[in-house]
Amino acid sequence: MSSNNYKILVVDDEEDILEFLGYNLKKEGFSVFLARDGSTAIEQSKKNTPHLILLDIMMPGMDGIEVCEKIRALPTVGKTIIAFLTARGEDYSQIAGFQAGGDDYITKPIKPKVLISRINALLKRVGWSELSTGQENSVITKGDLVVDRDKYIVFKGKEELILPKKEFELLLLLSSKPGRVFTRDEIFQMIWEDNVIVGDRTIDVHIRKLREKIGEGHIRTIKGVGYKFAE
């Protein structure tokens, strides 16, 4: 899907930011819709079903977290990517944003080229052409690393890696959404489930073993939060 087929909704209460983001996105060929408040953003989401929403966190009235929760409740925008916009220095919890249904966050101010690169990475991550046919990509490729979810194998270059079940599931979870921070609680629930009692350092041990096998640069630690797979 080319850029001019993607619809992006930009939500921010500051007019100059709306104009700046809107101008640069339109210049790249995206179809752009603008909203200055949460209520308008929800209506625009219902009407236009955007592929991606850039959503400001700190807005008067209904803040970005509440807007995200309401948009996620709309049945027509379930696959929409939501990236929070947050100014440097704002007291913002990544965990709260992800729990509300956000996929990523972008710190402003941001240079246009960097913004476009982030947006393209987010759109590529979801794989809209595959989602539209109801198919999920069974192979995840990142540099020399290949994860095949169907065959349950991992390649680093030409070398096939033999991973224990939990290590493979952990790698598959993180690599399925590069750049997305998974909290420790999320990882426990998705990999070990709530009814399994494991030690506090279980995740750390598995991450360490994965890094030894796939290389240090793929999995990054977000101190005090969790882990993410590098974009």
Image (cartoon, rainbow, N blue to C red):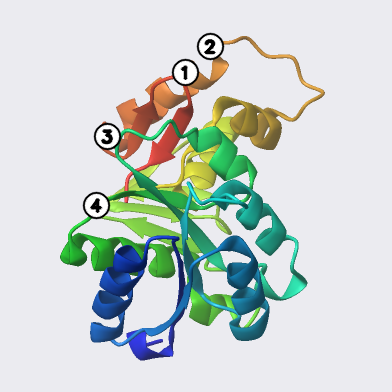
Labels 1 & 2 near each other (Cβ < 8 A):
yes
Labels 3 & 1 near each other (Cβ < 8 A):
no
The tag earlier along the polypeptide, 4 or 1, is 4
Q: Secondary structure at mark 4?
A: loop
Task: Please tell me in which quadrant of the rendered image residue 207 appears.
Answer: top left
On residue 109, the disc is: 4
Nearer the observer, 14 or 174: 14
Q: Is residue 169 visible?
A: no
Residue corresponding to mark 3: 215
Which amino acid type corresponds to the residue marked 2 in the rendered image?
Answer: Arg
Determine whether 24 is above or below 13 in the image.
below
Q: Secondary structure at mark 3?
A: loop
Query: Marks 2 and 4: which is nearer the front?
Result: 4
Residue corresponding to mark 1: 204
Q: Position of residue 168 (x, y in %)?
A: 52, 39
Q: Is residue 155 visible?
A: yes
Residue corresponding to mark 2: 201
